[in-house]
């Protein structure tokens, strides 16, 4: 009855020998976590003392962490342009914005992502709470709603999320990446907020000018009803759903094989699913399936199909049906969807190569041109509420790393120069010893709200100063020389035309504003 | 000669007994880190198996991580206003912007923060690289410059940083907090970029309307020269400097005690330091100290004093000397400063209570009204460059959590309502069964770029719709009824005056634009 767990580290001339005897843990009720922690701490202390690195040969590597990147000023200019389009749309639709911390209590994320939980970044246990970096913005949003007992909100949230996924950076897949989420929480009439989410995707993708796109729509209830009428056992719905989710990367034959060979589905059931998931259409398809002998047997499927019909009628009023397809093969990865689901796919992927890598099942993992996705999740907030009170939610997440990649490649391919500052005028001296005069002039301009700069040199060369303007796209130059100072004027030079004109000091601010207001 | 390290966990009826014999490690050359890791992994596995929590009683707590907070829409509105002022200033001075990942390789941060390194958040070792959350934006900036071989840049970076510090949230001290950094990197003529950093602090604090403020200025070379001429041994410069740094929270007597009793300085040296650090002034003080018999013996101090004189002459042209004080007691915590240092302090702290908590020596830790700080760090980039090439840098960091706190409390105290959306018009129906007509009208408005919304109900009550406008500050209501539809008009209602006027459908967009362009 005497349990024993022993870790022994013997070293020296005798070398190392470790013996670890772990018997059934139930016979060790006396071991506490605190005691194990203590032993771990001792070992780690020893580790630190003997050097940290595995072999003592240490080479500092100058890089960012795997799967992450810096944004340089040009990339930031593109990023801000994309954000401004997206935020403009969210605001046009009346969304408020919130922010949440980059890490959450580990248990806040537990049980929300299924097998993708292995991709969550945990923080080191440095004493205190166990923390993890957020994996998406949806779970923190649900936590926020439950914590603040909010039952109605239309909010957007733009922030970075973290996944220890296999990065594919040229294709815009990173371990640190932005999500732009728009969600509507509240008890409303069916399909009105859901339709607005699709309208938003339509507006944003049109606004970003990424070429043609399609928005695929389906409903979890239709999928589940379909599985039921095709004879999939209840406990296999989710796993068969995951297999269906692979249809955009694998041919039907392979998907069927997985269903039959790996998931143990009957060939007959698989074939019936195969027929349904090949269907695409609009409101007419929903109508047809409502009459379908098999499908109409499932109340769940009928509820989903009726809502798809309602959705399309609202989408007609929103003028977006041209891009929306009811597609029974759309399944999406995450468990928490309860109703409508959707995903936007770019048809032409611009100058970017099309990714063919297998999707890992994570919700927003960027795959073949997929740039947005979302759906209805009516149960998630209830998972956080102490009394399980539900708050129905529907939302969409724009995956912008892929969009950045496309825009960056477009920008590189184009001749157009991207400005990384907004400087309107450069204060320049034509002679030596005019530093103080330049300081005074640039101060006048700053104080008047003009975006202005000068070189941080006592006696910069005129040519160098003008060259800087050409290179960074500064449109105007304010030139100071002895003569200009004597005359109380500034020589204003237009960089593009090299035209120069004397402007009285008193009129300078107005003149700069006038000349840069349109440009 | 046989070394032995043994961890033994014996349990069961016998209870727990741990024996850990760690002798001198130098007698255990055979223990490798990998072997320790293996033992640690086994212990952790055991920990996971026996339950995770310390006692098995698990209670899910609905909260954010310690020292962090969510931003609700009102707080976000304030935050965006503050950011817009700060970014406006940075752009006016021609700064580009960059972004870096939230975590860095652990070793990138190693050896940069002195004893504050203990406050760094590490990520869990989940295989792969060892990572830490960024502690400030300066070290990632220096890493970015070295990695991309950039020798000239003027950039701003606004992002969250992470410190496992003791939080004091009501006073704006968090474990996750924003920094707004502006830095100028490059080899330029003395004090010109340094002066611009002070001009920027002046512009931002004036622009945010936080009441009166002072910017204290000193120079590390003056401090070091002062220590030398006062008889502080070379190896005690940094530790005595840390003690001087406490002068804004402790009376001189206590600071002196620490110097003499804890740091072992002679009483005479301490008294001499005490005389110098009580001095405050402007260019005249620098001039006077250059003539000071003692101080003038230090070349280092003289170089610093000459630069302070030069700095003040530039600040005169920038029109900011009214707020700038040369203060010999300013020391600042971080090791990496090499020249001028500065710190901005609010004189009246608005409605916020003044913090009296001891500062922990970290650079930007928010203390008594301190809202910005920075200085010159000419050696940091060289620490990352493989060949040690230096890039001189000077910069400033605005600590905005404290500013948020003040603005939030101001907003709460004021009667003024903060809008959290920018909706211009709400589309409303006066009768039942007009959902489709509302959908069509709101689509017309969205497509014209108008910020509009409607209730997600089929038949919302007119009163509820109007009430929503009142509550959320929406200025206009577009009312649809049978009669309006028949007449091809929309009834436009001004929420504040309740005035109503019929506008033809074709003229509606223009009318809304006209009425909301000024408001």
Image (spheres, coloured by chain):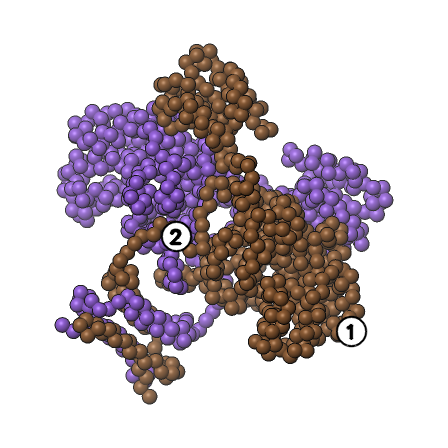
Chain colours: A brown, B purple
User: On the rendered structure, is B246 left or right of A314?
Assistant: left
Residue visible at 76% across and 48% down in the picture: B440
- In this view, A185 is above or below A419: below
Left or right of residue B359: residue A301: right
Residue under circle 2? B104
A2 w.r.t. B441: above or below: below
Res A131 quadrant in image: bottom left
- Please identify the quadrant where the C terminus of chain B is shown: top right
Residue A80 or residue B467, whichever sits in front: A80
As helix, strand or loop, the secondary structure at mark 1 comes to loop
Q: Chain of mark 1?
A: A
Q: Residue furthest bottom?
A: A1
User: Whole-percent x and y of residue B331?
Assistant: 28, 39
Please say whether residue A23 is visible from this viewpoint: yes
Determine the chain carrying the residue at label 2: B
Q: Do marks 1 and 2 share a chain?
A: no
Q: Residue at x 36, y 22 (%)?
A: A459
Read off the residue under disc 1. A293
B331 versus A511 height, above or below: below
* Residue pictured at 39% horizontal, 23% vertical: A461
- State which quarter of the image contains the N terminus of chain B: bottom left
Name the residue at 47% across, 66% down.
A118
Residue A396 is situated, as x and y percent measured from the top left of the image, at 61, 55
> How many numbered marks does the figure carry?
2
């Amino acid at each position: 009855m005497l349990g024993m767990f022993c870790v022994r580290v013997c070293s020296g001339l005798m070398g190392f020998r470790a013996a670890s005897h772990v018997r059934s843990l139930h016979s060790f009720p006396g071991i506490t976590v605190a005691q194990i922690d203590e032993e771990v701490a001792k070992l780690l202390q020893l580790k630190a003392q003997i050097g940290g690195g595995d072999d003592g040969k240490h080479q500092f590597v100058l890089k960012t962490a795997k799967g992450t990147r810096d944004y340089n000023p040009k990339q930031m200019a593109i990023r801000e342009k994309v954000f401004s389009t997206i935020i403009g749309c969210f605001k046009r639709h009346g969304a408020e914005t919130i922010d949440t911390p980059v890490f959450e209590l580990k248990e806040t994320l537990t049980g929300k992502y299924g097998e993708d939980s292995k991709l969550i970044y945990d923080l080191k246990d440095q004493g205190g709470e166990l923390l993890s970096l957020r994996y998406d913005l949806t779970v923190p949003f649900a936590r926020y709603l439950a914590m603040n007992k909010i039952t109605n909100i239309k909010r957007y949230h733009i922030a970075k999320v973290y996944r220890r996924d296999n990065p594919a950076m040229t294709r815009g897949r990173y371990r640190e990446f932005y999500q732009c989420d728009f969600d509507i929480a509240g008890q409303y009439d069916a399909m009105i907020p859901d339709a607005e989410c699709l309208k938003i995707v339509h507006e944003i993708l049109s606004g970003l000018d990424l070429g043609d796109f399609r928005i695929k729509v389906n409903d979890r209830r239709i999928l589940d009803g379909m599985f039921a009428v095709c004879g999939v056992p209840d406990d296999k719905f989710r796993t068969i759903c995951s297999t269906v989710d692979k249809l955009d990367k694998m041919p039907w034959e392979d998907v069927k094989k997985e269903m039959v060979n790996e998931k143990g589905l009957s060939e007959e059931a698989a074939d019936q699913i195969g027929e349904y998931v090949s269907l695409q259409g609009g409101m007419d398809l929903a109508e047809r399936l409502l009459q379908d002998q098999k499908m109409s047997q499932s109340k769940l499927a009928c509820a989903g199909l009726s809502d798809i019909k309602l959705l399309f009628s609202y989408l007609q009023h929103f003028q977006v049906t041209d891009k929306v397809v009811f597609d029974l093969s759309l399944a999406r990865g995450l468990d928490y969807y309860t109703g409508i689901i959707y995903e936007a796919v770019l048809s032409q992927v611009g100058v970017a190569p099309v990714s063919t890598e297998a999707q890992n099942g994570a919700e927003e993992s960027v795959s073949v041109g997929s740039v947005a996705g979302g759906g209805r999740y009516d149960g998630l907030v209830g998972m956080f509420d102490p009394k399980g009170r539900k708050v129905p939610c529907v939302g969409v997440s724009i995956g912008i790393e892929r969009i950045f990649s496309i825009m960056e490649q477009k920008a590189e391919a184009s001749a157009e120069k991207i400005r990384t500052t907004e400087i309107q005028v450069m204060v320049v001296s034509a002679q030596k010893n005019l530093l103080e005069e330049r300081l005074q002039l640039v101060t006048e301009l700053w104080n008047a709200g003009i975006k202005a700069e000068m070189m941080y040199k006592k006696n910069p060369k005129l040519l160098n100063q003008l060259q800087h303007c050409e290179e960074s796209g500064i449109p105007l130059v304010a030139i100071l020389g002895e003569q200009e100072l004597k005359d109380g004027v500034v020589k204003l030079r237009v960089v593009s035309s090299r035209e120069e004109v004397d402007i009285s000091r008193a009129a300078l601010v107005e003149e700069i504003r006038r000349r840069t207001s349109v440009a």
